Amino acid sequence: MQDRDQDRAWMREGTRLVLEAVDGFGPADWDAASLLPDWRRREVVAHIHLNAEAMSRLAGWARTGIENPMYPSTERRNRDIAETAELDGEALRRLVRHSAEVLEEDLDALDPDRWEHPVRTHRGDTIPAARIPWIRAREVMTHALDLGTGLGFADLPPEFTEALVRDVIRLRLRRGEAATLAAWLTGRGVAGEDLGPWM
């Protein structure tokens, strides 16, 4: 079982990596391609910002008991990312920093007994609120790499990458991708072949 305090430490480390990256972007850097297909850096940063707001909604759901989904719909989520991405770089920099700060405050506001309150992810999985820091850590750590500044998985804490591997394997097994995953892990398949996006 993962430790919530450790997950929050990883969440903060991933946020630091994201903010260091965006603080170094000049005006032209925002339109550079990210490591994600069809997304520039500005789309990645918009997504990171909106994800923090979505995590805050889940924290509010746990705190109050009033259902508050991460996103109204997939279509609305995608539209919000596209619209937010068109803001200028300085606005994106402010937004991604502010939403990360608000999420920290919202998690701090959870009473001990509310961490076990069930909430629902965008995928439809019901989880205890205690999983929110892990989900956010996973987002900021991996998307910090997707910004294409030269960071790789070897630059992340080894314990985090181990936890990430376990998490992704569980997800892919639930999706029925065991055969393809086994072929790759045993050196008998091409990395990523027939495996859809994991996040």
Image (cartoon, grey):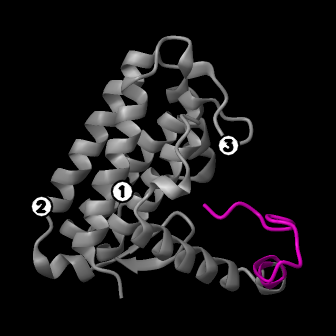
Q: Is residue 46 above or below residue 144?
A: above
Q: Quadrant of the C terminus?
A: bottom right
**Gap in angstroms between the C-alphas marked 2 and 3:** 34 Å
- Circles 2 and 3, Cβ within 8 Å, touching? The answer is no
- Which numbered disc covers residue 173? none
Q: Position of residue 57 (x, y in %)?
A: 33, 56
Amino acid type at mark 2: Ala
Q: List the residue tagged with mark 3.
A: 36
Label located before the other in sequence (2 or 3) = 3
Q: Where is residue 136 in the image (x, y as percent from the top left)?
A: 39, 59
- Which numbered disc covers residue 55? 1
Residue at position x 25%, y 60% from top?
Answer: 60
Q: Is residue 94 visible?
A: yes
Label located before the other in sequence (2 or 1) = 1
Q: List the residue tagged with mark 2.
A: 109
Residue at position x 16%, y 52% from top?
Answer: 105
